[in-house]
Image: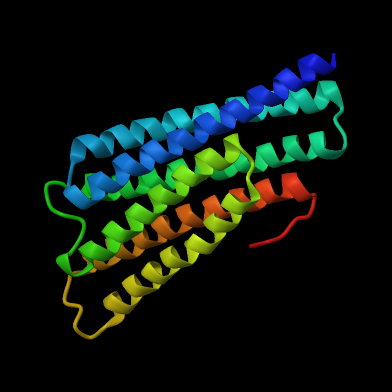
Amino acid sequence: MRAVFQQELLEVQARLVELAEGAKTIMDKGSRAFLNSDVSLADEALALSEANEERALDLDELVIRVLATQSPVARDLRILVSALRMSASLERMGSLASHIAAIARYRFPGSAVPESLRQTFEDMARLDLELVTKVVKLIGNTDLDLAREIQAQDESVDRLHRKVFEVVLDKAWQENAMFTVDVTLASRYFERFADHVVDISAKVSFLQTGEWTDI
């Protein structure tokens, strides 16, 4: 029975990695669609987001079944509870990335990014992809040093998010209302994507130490 339980835990971990890889792909396609007005990439990101939602539901059902049949305690219980919370974060990450793609879709054939903010959004996209790449590795190999590295890097995304608001609120901003709404929402989606990565890193730290810290 214990061997079966350990195999189920490995399956949960593998599915979490798959969800994280899915969120990474959606962000990659969604951000490139947003930056380059690529409607085909936007459509791909939107379709992948729906598939990732289904995978998250399947994972949740697996975790609930294991909880009901195995009655885990101590660290095993922490693993499964954390898996449910990570699943929710990863599903949300895919959804946020798809929202970025949707902005590009609605703007097509025009650009969703004014030149004054292009570099800022390029930097935000790059950082989000770096963070999600690290979280894929983190879920597969629970490394506290990597978790702390993720948490430190998140501040760079927050600074860029604040910069978008500074540009939009500046008197020199002359873009129309639709551009204003689009860039404000997009910036928020990039920032929240990174926040969820940090949340996952905190859950991994919880798995290793048994201590929960809100970040």
114, above or below 41, in the image: below
Decide if residue 59 is on the left or right side of residue 42. right
Q: Give the residue drawn at x 23%, y 44%.
A: 105
Which corner quadrant of the image does residue 111 belong to?
A: bottom left
- Across and down, in percent, residue 91 comes to 52, 39
Which image quarter is the C terminus in? bottom right
186, above or below 17, in the image: below
- Across and down, in percent, residue 116 comes to 18, 70
| Identity of the residue furthest to the left in this view | 109
Q: Give the residue drawn at x 33%, y 78%.
A: 166
Which corner quadrant of the image does residue 49 belong to?
A: top left
Q: Give the residue drawn at x 63%, y 30%.
A: 13
Which image quarter is the N terminus in? top right
Which corner quadrant of the image does residue 67 belong to?
A: top right
Q: Give the residue drawn at x 23%, y 63%.
A: 119
133, above or below 125, in the image: above
- Observer able to see residue 178: no
15, above or below 26, in the image: above
- Across and down, in percent, residue 31 comes to 30, 48
| Identity of the residue furthest to the bottom in this view | 171
- Across and down, in percent, residue 23 comes to 44, 39
